[in-house]
Amino acid sequence: MNPKYRNIFLLIGVIAIVVMLLTLDMSWAELLANVRRAGIWLPAVIVLWIPIYMMNAHAWRVILCDGATARVGYWRMLKYTISGYALNYVTPVGLLGGEPYRIMELSAYVGATRATSSVILYSMTHIFSHFCFWAFSLCLFVALRFSSINALTGSLLLVIALFCFLGIYFFLKGYRNGLAMRTLRLLSHLPFLGKRIRLFAETHEEGVLGVDRQIAALHRQRPRTFLLSLTLEFLARLLGCVEIMFILFVFTTRVSFWDCVLIQAFQTLFANLLFFVPMQMGTREGGLALITDCLRLRASYGVLTGLITRLRELVWIAIGLLLIRVGNRRGEGNISCEDSATIKEKH
């Protein structure tokens, strides 16, 4: 990638971190006191995200080198994964920073079409795993809390179930028929940007349709690759629930992993419904406060959980932004996915 573009991505992230720090709704003394209260569990939460990001990177790598004998620089994939998520955290509507960054970095190694299709496919799988996780958590809530469901709770569960069903249906249809061109056509109706997006879709129609063909081919011709990538993403989400458990250990050791799954599911659902808020500021904390109250835990548990989660994000955003500038020496860690037949010919 052109260093100029890396500097732009880096500048966006740095500005977002500064804004985040200046808009904290507590004093520095209160922040330091809460960090001390968290003790060993704050670094434990930060370290926990190493295997989570590694699973994310492997899920993406499975898609990128689908059907090929891969000679892939895994650590470079991990670097792009962490940096991409850092940019997603700090940009409104998510996906507006991290995905273009990943495509631009990978294009130099595997070409623009393959880079674009792999990033779109991975993003689809990552979001699809959200809906699978929410549907799983919905069934879990009914199984564990059936006796406590009243008319209001039941109505809310029905709305969530409908939302999950529509999301799963939309993505399965997108996997079968491709989603790139449909997304561009949908975005072409946006004010201000719509005309430019429509022009881009018309100018690059063949390339976009090629991306759609690759998306549909993965789902139809290599379902094992699709299921493996989806399974890795789903397991990464379950592992992420351990973060909630670590934080609640600050208050009590009597905490159920399945309650942590419900807390994680509700707060991510609440935050994603308000996806347009940069860094999900305030949305996660509100969702956490509501679900902890619903599970008959103290609302203060949700407040501290939101704070520690926010600090963990800041640490990994800083790491991701640093990685944008690190390890970019020309020719190092070249990514190539070659067919096994090609490799045999070489030997």
Image (spheres, helix red, strand yellow):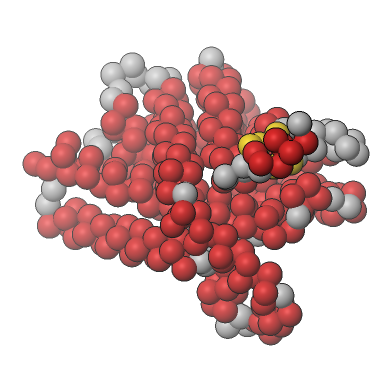
Residue ranking furthest to the left: 147
Q: Position of residue 195 (x, y in %)?
A: 69, 84
Q: Position of residue 15 (x, y in %)?
A: 77, 50
Let me know if residue 319 appears in the view.
no
Let me know if residue 157 appears in the view.
yes
In front of the other: 288 or 156:
156
Q: Is residue 83 left or right of residue 235?
A: right
Q: Name above or below for residue 88 compared with residue 274.
A: above
In front of the other: 122 or 315:
122
In front of the other: 64 or 230:
64
Which part of the image, by quadrant, shows the C terminus?
A: top right
The count of marks equals 0
**What residue sits 28% from the left and 25% below the top?**
256
**What residue sits 36% from the left and 44% below the top?**
133
Which image quarter: residue 230?
Answer: top left
Q: Name above or below for residue 86 compared with residue 332.
A: below
Q: Position of residue 213 (x, y in %)?
A: 56, 65
Q: Is residue 91 left or right of residue 309?
A: right
